[in-house]
Image (cartoon, rainbow, N blue to C red):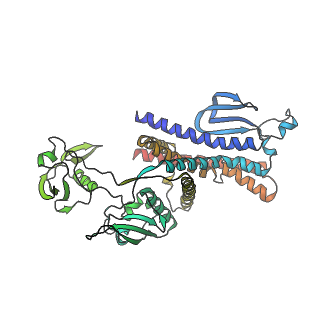
Amino acid sequence: MTLLQTLIAFFVALGVLIIVHELGHYWVARWCGVKVLRFSVGMGRIVYSRRLGPDQTEWALSILPFGGYVKMLDAREQDLAKLSPEELTREFTRQSVWKRIAIVAAGPFANFVLAIVLFAGLYSYGIPEPTARLRAVPENTAAYQAGLRGGELVTAVNGEPIRLWSDLRWRLLQLAVEGKQARLDIQRPNPGPSKGNLLDTKTLNLDSLSTSDLEGDFLGKLGIDLARPRPVLGRIVTDGPAMQAGLKEGDLILDVNGTAVADGLAFVELVRSSPGKPLLIHGQRNGKEFGVAVTPESYSKNNQTIGRIGTEVPLAPEMIIASDQPLAAIGKAIKKTWETSTLTLKMLGKMLIGEVSWRNVTGPITIADYAGQTARIGMISYLSFIAFISISLGVMNLLPIPVLDGGLLLYYALEVLTGRAIPERVGELAQRAGVGILMTLMAVAVFNDIIRLMS
């Protein structure tokens, strides 16, 4: 069932992205007066088609789902000898170079528009997300050296307001890629008798991050993690080790084996790592302290033996629903799309010069896996995933590689500069080189997908 959900989520996302991309080409071609002969979702042999509209455009579904195309009236592909002069004016190569540029650029542009629409809709609707409150900071990390200890709420990074954990992660990732420091504005609970928060600013040095760190949990490398609730026990399982030891719902765990427990997650991790080992728990119940001994029972999960004591421990972080007014949401969506696009290009540039591993190139298997995961989490995560993939598709199509939209735009840019089209022979050689580059990239992507799957 999980595999079926993953496949459905993947092909729905892929279909939306292909249709939007090709509709961009189609609409602008029609607007420029070019005759469209076929609109195909998929490549290869046509399995279903129907002709519609004044031009009797063939709307087709083809057998290979990975792609699509818009076939226009084109002298390079069709015999135009029998066409009337009026129809010849609607042939693609007879259009001005600026119209051809608009038609080609419309596909990637449509992907960016889709991302903006999805982001704007999500920002207007409201996204439940964790706040940017920090967990206890380990010593000997960049965050600890910056003076962060845990419990702080980050309100701004380099003057840019921060509301959500995802905002904090995104901004720090941008600064890490750019090699800049992060100035964090924070609110820290007042330890004194007076209520309220103390305001402070801390400078976080990101130089400790290597480019390989950016490929994984770079926040963890800095010593930054999401704050979790205090270790208060929830429901106790009947006759489990916790009940047998005398633990009760509502107990606050203070320390285990003499070591303070920072939060609920730390307590869970400690129990999981101690199958069959006695734990001396010091806690607080109704304002009074107590001590008990409990031995986690061994439990096998995913070929790994872990400990459990039979109690729930709430781990959900502090959440807020962040929503914006429509105009603000659109502006935020445009900014997010722009920043994601530029960050993608920067990471591609670092790959080319060897600063970032090519293991980050992903293919259809990984994308399908993420599609399934986000769909199971919920519609908000799934739509966010489609928005990010749409941006990636737009950026990749604009790369100056022959056979991609970016390659055609490069040809037309040279035509604008020189006043004449590139020679046909040069175009053919470039097309072959472009196919070779794409096949190599696809081979790398599939290889990386297989490695991830195996590991």
Residue 127 in the image, given as x and y percentages of width and height: 45, 49
Q: Reply above or below: 9 against 399.
A: above
Q: In this rendered view, identify the residue nearer to me: 132 or 44.
A: 132
Residue at the image point whose x is 49% and y is 57% from the top = 357
Query: In which quadrant of the rendered view does residue 258 lie?
Result: bottom left
Left or right of residue 287, residue 360 in this image: right
Q: Reply above or below: 180 against 109.
A: below
Residue 322 in the image, given as x and y percentages of width and height: 45, 53
Residue at the image point whose x is 76% and y is 44% from the top = 32
Left or right of residue 297, residue 376 in this image: right
Q: In this rendered view, identify the residue nearer to me: 417 or 342.
A: 342
Q: Residue furthest right?
A: 85
Total count of labels: 0
Residue 14 in the image, given as x and y percentages of width and height: 55, 40
Q: Reply above or below: 48 against 205.
A: above
Left or right of residue 397, residue 29 in this image: right
Q: In this rendered view, identify the residue nearer to me: 271 or 329.
A: 329
Left or right of residue 84, residue 301 in this image: left
Q: Considering the image in quadrants, where does the N terminus appear? A: top left
Residue 383 in the image, given as x and y percentages of width and height: 50, 44
Whether residue 92 appears in this view of the structure is: yes
Whether residue 402 appears in this view of the structure is: no
